Image: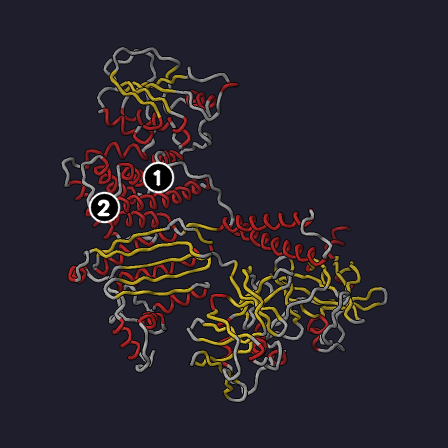
Amino acid sequence: MDAFESIKVTFFQECDEQLAELENGLMALEAGDGDGEVINAVFRAVHSVKGGAGAFGYEDLVKFAHTFETALDLMRSGKLAIDADAVRVMLRASDVLADLVHAARDGGSVDQERCDTLAEELTLLASGESKPAAMLEPEEEEDSFGFTPLQIALDDTPAPSGRWRIKFKPHQALYAKGNDPLFLLREVARLGECEIEMDADGVPSLDALDPDGSYLSWTVYLDGEKAESDIRDIFDFVESDCDLVIDREGAAPKPVVEIVPPVAATPAVAAPRAVAPARAEPEHRDEAEPGKAAASAGGASASAPPAATIRVDLERVDRLIDLVGELVINQAMLAQRVGETGAVERSSSVALGLDELEQLTRELQDSVMAIRAQPVKSVFQRMPRLVREIATATGKQVRLVMEGEGTEVDKTVIERLSDPITHMLRNAVDHGLEGPDERIDAGKPAEGTIKLAALHRSGRIVIEVSDDGRGINRERVRAKAIEKGLISPDVPMSDEEIDNIIFLPGFSTASAISDISGRGVGMDVVKRSIQALGGRISITSQPGRGSTFTLSLPLTLAVLDGMVVTSAEQTLIAPLTTIIETLQPKDGEVHRMGPNRAVLSVRDSFVPLIDVGVSLGFHETPTSPTDGVILLVESEGGGRAALLVDAIQGQRQVVIKSLEANYQRVEGVAAATILGDGRVALILDVDGLVAQRAADNRTSDPIPLAKAG
Amino acid sequence: MTDINSANRIELISFRIGDQEYCVDIMAVREIRGWAAATPLPHSPAYVRGVINLRGAVLPIIDLANRLGFGATETSARNVIIVVRIGGRVVGLLVDAVSEILTTTADAVQPTPDVACDAVKKFVKGILAVEGRMISWIVLDQILPDDAVLEVAA
């Protein structure tokens, strides 16, 4: 049972891959750059899903996949035109197929009505053609998951003439792609009574034998009633990886070695295996396997062999990353100590060794971080479906163009990308794009285009969502913001400032709350979740031409770009993303407000001044602002504040260490890190500091140490 | 015989704070290391000396003397940090010096006499008499600041 369950798990994993393949293929077809190979890939994907599903008895899934496959087969054989409508139906069918697979896996239910509708549409699509789909059914039904062994007559009597003679000699590539002649021969055997001969003459002596080589060939004699195309279909996926000759038998040639019944006789099957073990795992053949194996034989044949991968527990990788971070710190410490002794000359072997060590540790760190890096594809591939569904719901025609799916980013970031992207796409379809009529009136194609792109830019990942819709209606946005009291009516605002209003909390332009993007979540939430990741989001918009949302995120959440500052003799790190600018206040720029508050005037606007040392309780008497340095920061809520510190030491990338792991949350501190000298430095929680200041209504400056004890 | 012995046996590490001796269960102790300057944490009780880097982990240092109600420890290179595991957390205890490993049985642990002040009673599970010395057995569960208490104070 366990083995069965684990095969099932593998099946569903493969299903996910097949579904992704299917969707990719269909989208290529939709984009018009699909050739025969793409259609084949699409067909194989559905076929594999069906085959596996049959083996596990998922009737609904098999039924739907079969209908789907029938339509695809017509398309594959050129009997059904690959036009936009057909592809669109198929895309939706692929969504349903995905639903069915997930329902089969998780035990949920599917929208039966939707499923039936699409099955009907597919049938309609298929039956609209000259050849009824039903013709193909019996054979398809059988070859994928009906693995009842066939009884094959074993006799040496000369075969009746007029039979098909199929000469099949696999190349090494066929084995390399995970195909097994056994399955192919079994398929042939299903077509009718047949005789199979194996030719082992090509097998060299053991010392010359390449264990991965292909030395065997087979000749199959099959009853002549079947059409040649039926036979060719079986070898369809492997044709390029074997020599295949199919002809009518003239004179019956003599059996060369022995007659190999494809299913029943184990020794005959085992013999070639012992000589040429081409497949990696020949032992895996319990009763549950053929379904899966058939699926993989069908699915893997034409696609390139996947790069070898292993699945590793994420915890182990994290541990490794921790250790390497430690090594980097240690190496820096060692270099510093050696430098401090002053006894080591720059050209000495010790110094050279240290240089090399530094390089190696850097490389090691990069490679280890790369382990956790993943292409954004895993997030992107969920989006086409989302867009299709919103488009259907809003009655708009949308084409989603994706770029840079291969862009890699740390796993910790990947997991958090999905929500903001989902939200931005929803917004783009729902608010950004116009309806088809409006678009045509505006002289644009009825189908709107949304582009989702990922790219690396200066050590960060940038995600862009752009549409060619109506752009931001600035007048309406401004009026709305005034109406909601978010801005004052008499402040002149630049276009850019107005565009950014949409990020303000409590702002939503859709006049009626729509089902799509009006779930009580606005762009402010998107902005906040991005900022929580140390990212930024911005918008550019051209009326009538569309809008572009750009969000940039750090490549990893394990490290952070920080400004190293000192305050009250403590080294602190301020996240670089929060800092707008740094400045040295002059006399007269700091204004006292009340007994112990101060504001800083920055180009005619006043921002609250926060003495970091006092705020954190490191010292009681505030630093004189003119002696220190100001970090002008922007908090999540968009509010600005001026953080007063003693000095800035520089910028550096730091590894984020949690304080909560061994202690607890500390107010005003986001996390900790370890500096080059091995000491712990605290990373400032800028939002916390600003919020704390705002909430602090005491009449005197707090003395936190006394208060807490 | 040995089974009963081992089942009953307790191993403890004893250490000094000022001129008094205390001990903790050896099973909780991860390592013992020398004093290194800690980075102070804002808004923390005085007995939390700050955090140090232990091979990549950031761990808080509890000044045990201060926690027990003595004054803050004047630290020098002679001070010792006993790294202990409390629940899922790893914490450093700042003490003056580590003395020895004691092997005793649960029967030998005497209840804390009533004279002890509240602060000590909260942390002392019992006392041991070893060669005429008195060693107090400290339970670690309450050593860390209570989250709730801290929140109220903050």
Q: Position of residue A671 (x, y in %)?
A: 55, 65
Tag 1 subunit: A
Determine the secondary structure under disc 2. helix
Q: Is residue B20 visible?
A: yes
The quadrant holding residue A445 is bottom left
The dot on residue A52 is: 1
Q: Considering the image in quadrants, where does the C terminus of chain B appear?
A: bottom right
Q: Nearer the viewer, residue A185 or A27?
A: A27
Q: Amino acid at mark 2?
A: Val
Q: Position of residue B104 (x, y in %)?
A: 78, 60
Q: Nearer the viewer, residue A246 or A596?
A: A596
**Number of residues whose C-alpha sits closer than 10 Å to that of mark 2, classed few (under 14), some (14–19) or many (20 or more):** many
Determine the secondary structure under disc 1. helix
Q: Nearer the viewer, residue A373 or A707?
A: A373
Give the mark, 1 or 2, whose residue is nearer the N terminus: 1
Q: Position of residue A698 (x, y in %)?
A: 53, 85
**Number of residues whose C-alpha sits closer than 10 Å to that of mark 1, classed few (under 14), some (14–19) or many (20 or more):** many
Whether B108 is drawn above or below A597: the answer is above
Q: Label 1 vs label 2: CA separation?
A: 24 Å
Residue extending farthest bottom: A594
Circles 1 and 2 on the same chain? yes
Residue at image location 56% in from the left, 48% down from the top? A364
The quadrant holding residue B58 is bottom right
Q: Are marks 1 and 2 in contact (CB under 8 Å)?
A: no
Q: Position of residue A540 (x, y in %)?
A: 32, 65
The residue carrying mark 2 is A87
Whether A245 is drawn above or below A132: the answer is above
